[in-house]
Amino acid sequence: MSKKTLQLDKSHRLLAPRIAYLVTSIDKGGIVNAAPFSNVTSVSTDPQRLVLSVYKEWDTIRNIQEVGQFVVNVPSKHLLRQIWICGDKYAGHPIPSKVNELEIAGLEAMPSEKVQPPRVKDCFGHLECEVQWIKDVGNHFLVLGDIVAASYTEGCLDENMVQVINKTLPLLEVCRGYFTSPADVVEVDRETIKNEVNGKLAQKGIRVPPEIKKYEKLKISEK
């Protein structure tokens, strides 16, 4: 199988598809800004923290620097058009600063539980965050946020607090203007793979230390 070299300025495209989130923030005057981001990831589960990577020239980072809070909203694929509208500068149809993108896109804001920026009612999930630090990482700022409140639309998570994908239909960005959404959920055959790994370790005479055997009992709800 042959390999081809990818030009470095396109290398990040190999990290696709990435979930498209809608981040809401406000300035000191209370004006709401909404912008889509796929550069969001969980970085700690104790405490619950995530990082957000933001273009330096965007209103989002100015609001975050001023207020120190933001909300990560999780949309379904049915909101693709609205998410693209909120993408204004990134999407090529810039909306002036101090104009609420939610109103232009026809999305509804609702109060958050613990932070000033609103949640987006149309989205199925919401993570309210308070800023811990902001770092310059290139043409972006990296923002570490503590998740101080989380909420979701009833029925979108099962009894183990796992997304019901055929209801949430999360939106994933492939590249600028191209998106996809998962069609199926594929479950790992855990016991078969566990037995296979243990068999290969035994063949090599490798013993699993007791201190890491605790991971054998992990459930999906414990991740």
Image (cartoon, helix red, strand yellow):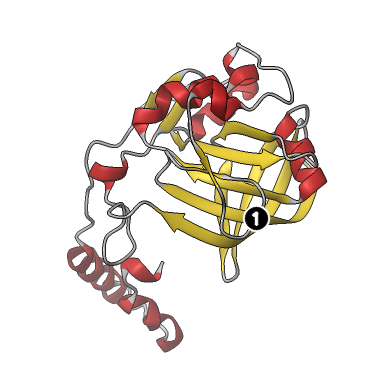
Residue located farthest toward the top when viewing the structure as drawn: 93
Of the pair 201 and 9, the residue shown nearer to us: 9
User: Relative to residue 66, is residue 83 depicted above or below?
Assistant: above
Looking at the picture, tell me which residue is in the foreground, 75 or 54.
75
- Image quadrant in which you'd find residue 218: bottom left
Q: Quadrant of residue 178?
A: top left
- Which residue appears at 26% of the width and 66% of the height? 159
Q: Is residue 213 left or right of residue 7?
A: left
Q: Position of residue 118 (x, y in %)?
A: 59, 45
Asked if one can make out residue 208 in the rendered structure from this viewpoint, the answer is no
Residue shown at the point (35%, 31%) measured from the top left: 77
User: Which residue is at 23% across, 36% downward?
Assistant: 183
Q: Quadrant of the C terminus?
A: bottom left
The x, y position of residue 199, in whole percent, is 23, 71
Residue at 66% of width from left, 35% of height from top? 32
Q: In what element is the residue under mark 1?
A: loop
Residue 46: give x, y in percent of width and height: 57, 71
Amino acid type, mark 1: Val
| Residue position for label 1 | 115
